[in-house]
Image (cartoon, rainbow, N blue to C red):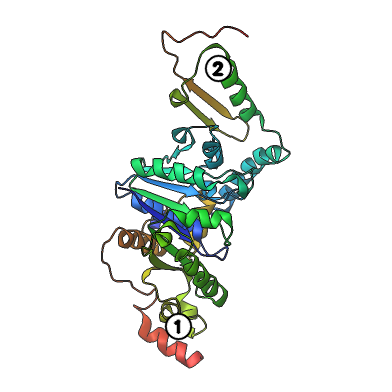
Amino acid sequence: MSLFTFFNRKGSAPAARERLQILLAHERVNIGGQSDLVTLLREEILAVVAKHVTIDPEKVTVTMDRGDNVSTLEVDIEIPLHAEKKKAA
Amino acid sequence: MAKVIVVTSGKGGVGKTTSTAALGAALAQRGEKTVVIDFDVGLRNLDLVMGAERRVVYDLVNVIQGDAKLPQALIRDKRVETLFLLPASQTRDKDALTTEGVETVMETLKRHFDWIICDSPAGIERGATLAMRHADAAVIVTNPEVSSVRDSDRIIGLLDSKTLKAENGERMEKHLLLTRYDPVRAARGDMLKVDDVLEILSIPLLGIIPESMEVLRASNLGTPVTLADKSSAPALAYEQAARRLAGEIIPVTIPGERRSILAKMFGRRAA
């Protein structure tokens, strides 16, 4: 333990408490059987895009960050220039 | 070629997840590409100990069921760029893991990683047997305490019978990792001695991790112990254990033995 950490020690419990609160707030929604909003949006966005172009699953990157007040969802889909346009059903 | 390690114990709460995170981070810091996999479907915690719980998008079950590709489910660590996490599903049950599915995932990972560390769930059910199935080596996490030693012995039996290595007539490499070792109680004679545990289980010692506040602090913060305070006793012990796992020969020091003359005198007098 360095001197710096010794004097800056306010304990790690508040951090643990905060992490758990955020995590559980998101997880409790999930346990009821339905997905939380971020997951639902992710699935629907992918479904909408897939309706129009054939998505190569290898070319899709999805990142999420479940926050306290704000969550972020980032969906990165590579659509080739000559992507085959699907006929609307 | 990748080396597959299972971190297992039989008994719960002995430090499998902590050890998986600490060893995985230590190996990745050597510059070797490492993935840690949570096999505890329904009760995942490796994501929390690694500090990646807010970033889980897809999990092992999604990959097995074809809902996501493996690269999409892998979460890259923000501190060590050669470290990855494959989380377990929190909403499914253990039957969602299939033998074939796990095999496909392991075969793919083997082509891309140097180390694959499987965090086994407690118990001897499906999740635990699938976690150990593809292992080249096992780290058996044991506390110096009777029920933990007994469960470890049971797990050693399973490693020698229910794994691919065993089925092919090969020998499973086994290592004992003694965790929550308390030098004060050991000196007082109230804790099983290292030699006692080694003699009973008769497998080689990978390391001794002292009981420490640093372990709790690190999990509170979501940091593997080996990435938190690197000079702390458990971080050093895990770092050395990782190097031994990688084949280096480093003698094991028993915590508290350096100041042992006084401690032993007082220890004996108290006993």
Residue B26 screen position, x and y as percent: 36, 53
Q: Visible in this render: residue B194?
A: yes
* Element marked by disc 2: helix
Q: Nearer the viewer, residue B124 or B85?
A: B124
Residue B177 screen position, x and y as percent: 42, 67
Residue B237 screen position, x and y as percent: 37, 64
Count of numbered circles in the view: 2
**Residue drawn at (39%, 73%), measured in percent from left and top?**
B203
Residue B11 screen position, x and y as percent: 56, 66
Name the residue beneath numbered marker 1.
B187
Mark 2: amino acid = Ala
Task: Please determine if labels 2 and 1 lie on a single subunit.
Answer: no
Pick out the residue farthest to the left: B249
Spatial separation of the CA atoms under disc 2 and disc 1: 66 Å
Task: Please tell me how crowded label 1 is: few (under 14), some (14-19), or many (20+) other residues with Cα within 10 Å.
Answer: many
Number of the front mark, 2 or 1: 2
Q: Chain of mark 2?
A: A
Pick out the residue farthest to the bottom: B269
Q: Nearer the viewer, residue B94 or B268?
A: B94
Name the residue beneath numbered marker 2.
A50
Task: Please tell me how crowded label 2 is: few (under 14), some (14-19), or many (20+) other residues with Cα within 10 Å.
Answer: some
Q: Chain of mark 1?
A: B
Pick out the residue farthest to the right: A32
Mark 1: amino acid = Ala
**Residue drawn at (50%, 72%), measured in percent from left and top?**
B153
**Residue drawn at (59%, 20%), measured in percent from left and top?**
A47
Q: Quick check: B137 above or below A88?
A: below
* Element marked by disc 1: helix
